Image: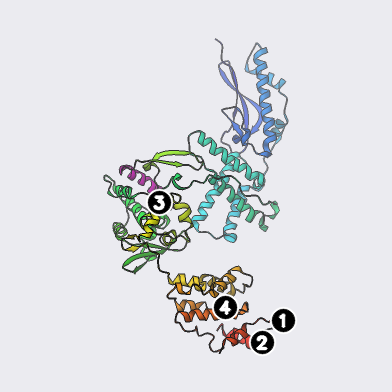
Amino acid sequence: METKESLNFNLREPRKKGVTPLYAVVKMEGKQYKISTGLKILPYYWNEKKQSVCFDRVSRKDIENTILIQKALNQYRFVYLKYKTYICDKNIDSLKSYFYKHIVMTEIQEKTKSSKAVVNKPKATNLLIKAFDIYYNEVSEAKEGSKRQKRGLLNHFIKYCEVIGKDEVSMLSQTGLNDFQNYLLNQSKEKQQKGKKGAGNEQIKAKYNFCATLINNVLAVHSDFAKYKISKVEYSKLKVVKIEGEDKKKRPLMQNELDAITNVQGLTEEEKEYRDLFLLECYGSYRISDTEKMFDKSKQKHISMNGMDFLTFETQKEGITAVIWLDDKVKNLISRFDNGLKYADFKDQHKYMVKMNKNLQIIAKKAGLNKTETYKDSHGVRHEAPTHKIITSHWARYTFIYNGLFVWGLTSSQLKTFTAHADSTMIDEVYNVYAKSAEKLVEQAAKALQGAKFEGVSSEPAKPTESEAHEELFSYSSIKQIKGLLDTNISVINLPMAKQAINVIKDVSKLDNFKEIDFEKIKEISPVIFELSYLFYDSQLYLIYQYKLKHFGLPSDGYWDSFFNSEDDIAYIFQRKDEEEKTDSEIQAYENSHR
């Protein structure tokens, strides 16, 4: 009986981080034999299925060696074919002799035989981890949540080094980062070919760019790393597929869907708790990261105004005040947790979010949310799935914003007060999935024109607040920042913000837009306005500031009345003396203003 003979090549340690021997596996005489080839390769570079080097994974630095490895393997195959053709008495010993006689020792085999591990070389991963700590201690301020997210991006590079078995300073170069990006792209492509979800270009770009940020802002410029001679790199130019509008995987829930979730039967006690928490997000507008503050009264402030109740707290993400309107629905949902929560734990936000989404999808399925959703993934590929399979807690924020824009008729600028955004950009560009829908825009406009009401709150333009008056008339926030700079002896003469603040204060065109201001609050910035008048030799600035106070029926701030009897006196103090030093009286007036 003729036995089947074959030649293959296997890695000794397929999961090793560094190079591993590549040996020949021969089947003959009904047995399997292993023969040393003298070749070594990184497991990441080897394609077991194709029995060859996977050159699209090889870095530029290793391309020459891997070509030599592939040539050596081809030589083994050719010699083995000659052996099968011309040798009659076939056995493993004769095959080994034939190999040793006919295989020409290649340069790469000589290298791998004589190579020894190099010790005490700095590792790219260790340098990046040190750079990470320096970056957030000396360069950038960030909250712990943001740091954890960025560390997650860095972990992808660390994992990459483990997979390819390399961890060298040379990887912190333009070529090294390009290889990292190509690795991520190939990894994503392979996952997609297997029907799995691969990372999109936006995610890949974020991983690449954070490494580039650490290199450019720390490793290439910080004295601690000067000896490594690391150069700055370019940021990724990878094209990102931007999914917008109704192509998104996330969307707002309509009222009939909210009703279905509210009235669904057959839920477990745990599912009921998560259902109520999700509905509270839909009607309360807060971020999931702030959920704990909805139940911690020590972090809340309750305010009643115009017959309505509100709850406020400082947000974790933006660090600004969140305003929660406590209408009947929200009050009812909060009251369901008067005895505490049994299943949800907010201490680990990631675990809470995973558990919320898992329960939410079960709830949505029981509620019959089976509509076929069509959306694009991060690669721009269109998919279909029932609602209950893709719904997440983030849909709650989309839902609140949809109701604010299209049910209540608010503008995005008005709505940002409830969503705790610094401005309306996120609402317009991210959450408003119908921003380009003509029908929805007309619907929104019609409601605004009709003065649509929602449970006692009018969608008519809100009356200007005192805080808006402080900004529009006195540039309050900027003046406070300028005060901080002046207090630390930092010059503001060439600061654009100072000049912009002066222009705001000198602009009287908006006076009639406001009815009142907080005099005590404005008096806080009076010394700063006086100092700016002095520094910029601008008597008009100070005079217009006093004029605005009188417009609101308020007295002069009282700081300077004892010094000046007329406009001429003030003008004299602030007149420019390019070549002269200040007189004693001017210096005295300036110092007295700071008492």
In the picture of the structure, the residue carrying the numbered disc 3 is 440
Which of 196 and 502 lies nearest the eye of the viewer? 502
353 inside magenta stretch: yes
Cα gap from disc 3 to disc 1, whole angstroms:
64 Å
- Secondary element at image label 3: helix
Real-space Cα separation, disc 2 to disc 1, in angstroms: 12 Å
Q: Which residue is mark 2?
A: 583
Q: Are circles 3 and 2 on residues that touch, CB within 8 Å?
A: no
Magenta stretch mostly in which secondary structure?
helix
Whether 134 is drawn above or below 74: the answer is below
Residue at numbered disc 1: 579
CA–CA distance in space, label 3 to label 4: 46 Å
The numbered mark at residue 358 is none
Q: Is residue 351 visible?
A: no
**How far from the left and from the top, in percent, is residue 209?**
59, 49
| Number of the front mark, 3 or 2 | 3
10 Å neighbourhood of mark 3: few (<14), some, or many (≥20)?
A: some
Residue drawn at the location 61% of the way across and 53% of the way down: 214
For residue 112, above or below residue 563: above
Q: Which residue is denoted by mark 4 in the rendering?
A: 541
Q: Which residues are magenta?
A: 349-368
Is 60 rendered above or below residue 485?
Answer: above
Q: Position of residue 57 (x, y in %)?
A: 61, 36
